[in-house]
Amino acid sequence: QVQLVESGGDLVQPGGSLTLSCAASGTNFAAYTMGWYRQAPGKQRELVAEVTSDGRINSIDSMKGRFTMSRQWIKNVVDIQLLNLRHEDTAVYFCNAHQPSTSIQYWGQGTQVTVSA
């Protein structure tokens, strides 16, 4: 059974940083793109950043320069450090793993990130 387990969500002040971690298990993820999405109240789920199977990192423009990402290939762990957080970064963050060009996709349960003074 495939599982994606997230951790690290918290309340953080504007300008602060936070690291989210996702541990995946249940299959061989070598060919998967793994990353993070988020969904704010009343908004659609959107990509934050992802790492492809050949190590390329894609992200949304609003997060460029405000995150670092790492992927541990053997442990199937993908971490994202969110930097200089803003109120508008408040959302539920979801770990995602998918095989490009297929319908195979998995989601974690989500972890809440709240940016507030």
Image (cartoon, grey):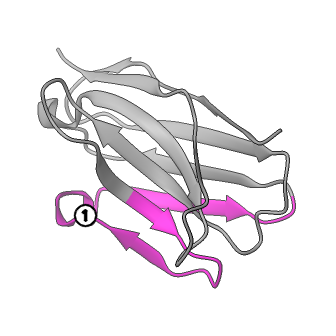
Camera-nearest residue between 21 and 117: 21
Q: Quadrant of residue 38?
A: top left
Q: Which quadrant is home to the N terminus?
A: top right
Q: Residues within 10 Å of mark 1 (few under 14, many from 20)?
A: few
Q: Residue furthest front?
A: 103
Based on the picture, tell me whether residue 14 belongs to the magenta stretch. Answer: no
96 horizontally vs 66: left or right: right
Return the x and y of residue 108 as percentages of the image width and height: 58, 35
Tag 1, which secondary structure? loop
Q: Residue at x 63, y 53 (%)?
A: 78
Q: Residue at x 22, y 37 (%)?
A: 89
Camera-nearest residue between 69 and 102: 102
Q: Quadrant of residue 115?
A: top left
Q: Residue at x 76, y 63 (%)?
A: 29
Does 7 sit above or below residue 19?
above
5 horizontally vs 38: left or right: right
Return the x and y of residue 34 as percentages of the image width and height: 58, 60
Q: Residue at x 31, y 33 (%)?
A: 16
Based on the picture, tell me whether residue 55 belongs to the magenta stretch. Answer: yes
Does 103 sit above or below residue 76?
below
Camera-nearest residue between 103 and 75: 103
46 horizontally vs 113: left or right: left
Give the residue number, with chain letter if any, for mark 1: 60
Camera-nearest residue between 14 and 25: 25
- How many tags in the picture? 1
Q: Which quadrant is home to the C terminus?
A: top left
Which segment did they paint magenta? 49-74
What's the amino acid at mark 1? Ile
Return the x and y of residue 51 as percentages of the image width and height: 54, 69
